[in-house]
Image (cartoon, rainbow, N blue to C red):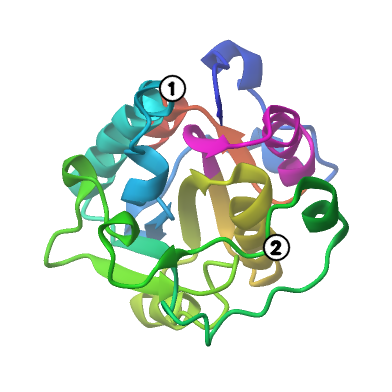
Amino acid sequence: MAVDRHSAAAVAGAEPLQTDVSARPERIDAARAALIVYDACRRALTPADAARRAAIRPVLDAWVTLIGACRARAMPIIYTTPVSRADGADVVLLPTDLSVQTGVPSLTNCIEGTPDAGFPDEIAPRPQDFVYLKRRPSAFYGTGVAELLRALRRTVLVIGGGATNRGVETSVREAFSMDLDTVVVRDCCWGGDAAAHAYSLDTSMKMYARIRTLEQVRAMLA
């Protein structure tokens, strides 16, 4: 299980841009922002295996802190959870190179309605929050999240989740195409492939978002 161990100093600045975006103050306008809690379900954050549960615990703790900070700023909290029907009627397993190499299906959702698809008690949604069932990797495709953001007039996203290099990056790239200003919280991301997790945070997503530590994001919300 890959989780992030970077210090704030290691990711203190964004890559310089010709548009001088890097010169802007590092702030998140809570009045325009929303938090997406991407697939932070029980299956991922409270697995039955004790070793895996201990390894992922820092991510769950980070989520507790981040959600608390966003609630304090009255930001909308949007949860997604990856589900499929028990009979598999809504699943299309497409042939991909990685699925052939690893034997892992191209779509690995929880079964809809099972405890695994719910959320750990520490970060459970509250009545005012928004919860969306998600059947494909993107937080936006077929969910209604994009429409909600427009209705709430939110143009800034704070997001974390897993797997970093799969669904989180898919959602970040789509958010970029929707002209959403996105901040990825490193400490709240995880993945089963350590190299892919690191590459996504350190290289590929930097084109589409700002990648920041939990402490940096807390400061940006202050």
**Residue density around tag 2, few if under 14, some if 14–19, many if 20 or more, within 10 Å:** some
Q: Residue drawn at (48%, 45%), measured in percent from left and top? A: 160
Q: Which mark is residue 80?
A: none
Image coords of residue 150 (percent x, y): 44, 80
Image coords of residue 177 (percent x, y): 71, 69
Q: Residue drawn at (68%, 28%), measured in percent from left and top? A: 194
Q: Residue drawn at (54%, 73%), measured in percent from left and top? A: 140
Q: Residue drawn at (67%, 67%), measured in percent from left and top? A: 174
Highlighted magenta segment, given as a residue range? 184-206
Q: Report whether 28 appears left or right of 189.
A: left
Image coords of residue 7 (percent x, y): 54, 13
**Which image quarter holds the C terminus?**
top left
Circle 1 residue: 55
**Residue kind at label 1, given as amino acid type:** Ala
Circle 1/circle 2 CB separation < 8 Å:
no
Of 163 and 183, the residue lying toward us: 163
Image coords of residue 35 (percent x, y): 38, 54
**Residue kind at label 2, given as amino acid type:** Ser
**Residue density around tag 1, few if under 14, some if 14–19, many if 20 or more, within 10 Å:** few
SS type, badge 1 = helix
Circle 2 residue: 106
Of the residues under marks 1 and 2, which one precedes in the sequence? 1
